[in-house]
Image (cartoon, rainbow, N blue to C red):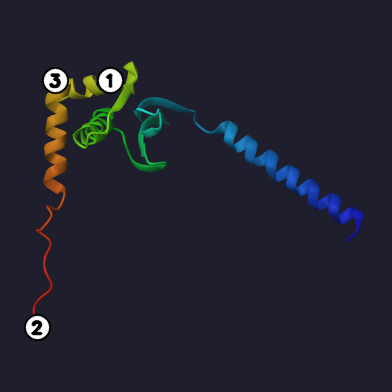
Amino acid sequence: MSIQSKARRDARKRKAQRDRNQARAGAAPIEPHAELRDRDDNLLAGIVRQSGVWVLGMDGRIVGSSDSAAQVLMLIRRAQRLHDQQGVPVKLVYSDALRDEAELEAATHGKSLADYEQQLEEEMAAVQPVAGDEPSAPAH
């Protein structure tokens, strides 16, 4: 390998890195808005907003996104209740911006935030298959 080919390859790598950095610099910022943590301060779930979309993450993975602040707030509160029911104490902290947007959304539906979250819970339960309701294989 010649010194010149190595220099060209290194120059391509530097240019590719510059291009990646410029692309990241132009990306919309990620705003953290909620954290669900256990007693050891391990992050269990979180909500961020990027480009106006609320994103819910759990166990290090994105599990969903929505334009609805009330929906993601309801989901992380549900995760908090599930942990509490299992005897795992957790702490949920969320931003005023998330709460305010969720309350505004609920008000546009003529409901309090608590009532609107209850409606969302009911709608979610209605679309989830209930255990035991799955069709069984036909007997031969």
Q: Which residue is drawn at 17% across and 29% down?
A: 117
Q: Mark 1 points at which residue?
A: 99
Of the residues shown, which amino acid type is indicated by label 1? Arg
Spot occupied by residue 63 in the image (x, y as percentages of width and height): 34, 43
Quadrant housing residue 73: top left
Along the horizontal axis of the image, is 76 left or right of 26?
left
From this view, report whether residue 21 is shown above or below residue 94: below
Against 108, residue 2 (above or below) is below
Q: Quadrant of the N terminus?
A: bottom right
Kindly identify the residue that appears in the image at 36 percent across and 39 percent down. 58
**Residue occupied by mark 3:** 112
Q: Label 3, label 2: how many angstroms apart (C-alpha)?
A: 54 Å
Image point 64% across, 36% down: which residue?
Answer: 21
Between residue 108 and residue 115, name the one nearer to us.
115
Considering the numbered disc 2 on the image, is that residue within a helix, a strand or a loop? loop
Residue holding disc 2: 140
Q: Dot 3, how many residues are within 10 Å of its Cα: few (below 14), some (14-19), or many (20+)?
A: some
Which is nearer the N-term, disc 3 or disc 2?
Answer: 3
Q: Is mark 1 on a helix, strand or loop?
A: helix
Given contact means CB atoms under 8 Å apart, are the residues at marks 3 and 2 in contact?
Answer: no
Marked residue nearer the N-terminal end (2 or 1): 1
- Badge 1 density bin: few <14, some 14–19, many ≥20, Cα 10 Å: some
Residue 107 is left or right of residue 72, and the answer is left
Q: Earlier in the sequence, mark 3 or mark 1?
A: 1
Badge 3 amino acid: Ser
